[in-house]
Amino acid sequence: MDRPRTPRRNRKLYLTLVGAVLLAVATTTVGFRVDAGMPAVPRQSVRIAKVEHGTLDRSVGSPGTLVPERIRWITAATTGRVERLDTEPGAVLDAQAIILRLHNPDLELETLQAKSELAAARAELANLAASLETERLGQEAAVASVSSERSEAARTADANERLALLGSVSGDELARSRERDDELGTRLGIEQRRLRVLSKARVAQLEAHRARVTQLEAVVRFRERQLRDLEVTAGEAGVLQELPVEVGQWVLPGTLLAKVVQPDRLKAELRVPEIRAKDLRIDQDARIDTHNGVIEGRIARIDPSVTGGVVKVDVRLLGALPAGARPDLSVDGIIELERVPDVLWIKRPARAEAEGTVALFVLDADGIARRRRVKLGRASVDTIEVVEGLQEGDEVIVSDTTTWDQDERIRID
């Protein structure tokens, strides 16, 4: 049986249609594979920021703690055993409040001995003063006696001279009266010099014994002060922050007994990483977040050395302390460095460092984010300057994109 032939024109039309279908399928398949190789990321799962133009407020953020501006460290003035604790940490104290009491029987005995030595030295001084005064009076009597004898001898010599002129007294008698007058004059001078020597010696001896008494009085005062120091007082009004001793503990001079602070006079001690501390200056403004309020402050001191990779910065608080502010409270500080006008800036991307270069995903109008090298400049806590690679209005993914480090493009849905 013969088959009917298909016209050549119909065959060409058929082949054309088949080719078009195959081309459409191939094109769709290729397009699907291209899109399938590009990660699709939900828009709400990333942070997108827009490049801004204007003034960049540079600041440095760092953690820290509130510490007292004034701390009174109370240490043991002498050895002793802790006999009693009269208060506990957190108590509000006045200057005379007793914190704890120590006991030292050896110190009590030494005080009694010092008082006994002082009493003996005072008695010895009194006896010496009386003895020297008696000796001085005896010497003054001797001077007075010789002076009287010499006066009598002088009158006799004068009388004999007048009688010798009348021939009533011999020359020998006159010579003896003159010699007697001279002898007593010499004796009087010697006795007077002896009195002066005795007076000087008396003063020196009394001064030496008085110095001994003064020394013993100082020893007694020192021992009595040590006894008083066994009752450890606050010394100034404040709050007892630490009491690191227990009843029965034996302490040595210099041992820390307590720490008293003034809770209404606090400062913030910030720990700034050393790489961010180069722009810090005294009197720069700061904000201290206590997690229950923000306090304005100003840098008062910058530690000259680096410890553990950080620089300690003291911030003087200018405002009133919020409720709950107390020593050792953890805080966050932001130090205002400078205001940089007329620059491009953006919210600080993850892993972005100042004066560095970073690869960022920049969004196109079609919803595709393409990787682009961006040069960055000066940085702040949450913003950073854009030097090259971006323009005002560009939208950039600033959250962590390490998941797509091997991709050059991602689709934002």
Image: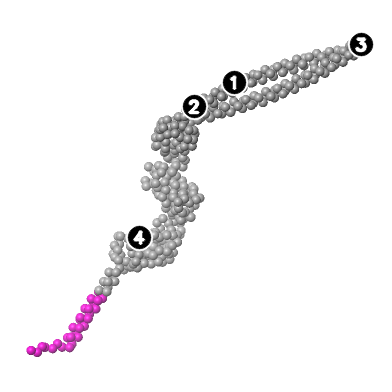
As measured in the structure, the alpha-carbon distance from the residue carrying label 1 to the one carrying label 2 is 23 Å
Which numbered tag is attached to residue 123? 1
Q: Do the residues labelled 3 and 1 touch (CB within 8 Å)?
A: no
Find disc 2 in the rendering and name its residue. Answer: 108
The amino acid type found where label 4 is placed reads Asp
Tell whether position 12 is magenta. yes
- Residue 24: x %, y % from top left: 23, 77
Q: Are marks 1 and 4 in contact (CB under 8 Å)?
A: no
Q: Earlier in the sequence, mark 1 or mark 2?
A: 2
Q: Count neighbours of disc 2 (C-alpha within 10 A) and say few if under 14, some if 14 to 19, many if 20 or more.
A: some
When the figure is inspected, residue 333 is found, relative to residue 72, above or below; the finding is below
- Residue 359: x %, y % from top left: 39, 65
Find disc 4 in the rendering and name its residue. Answer: 400
Can residue 239 be spotted in the picture?
A: no
The amino acid type found where label 2 is placed reads Glu
Can residue 289 be spotted in the picture?
A: yes
Q: Magenta region: which residues?
A: 1-28
The amino acid type found where label 3 is placed reads Gly
Image color mode: one colour
- Residue at left offset 57%, top offset 22%: 120
Quarter of the picture holding the N terminus: bottom left
When the figure is inspected, residue 396 is found, relative to residue 148, above or below; the finding is below
Find disc 3 in the rendering and name its residue. Answer: 167
Judged by its main secondary structure, the magenta piece is: helix
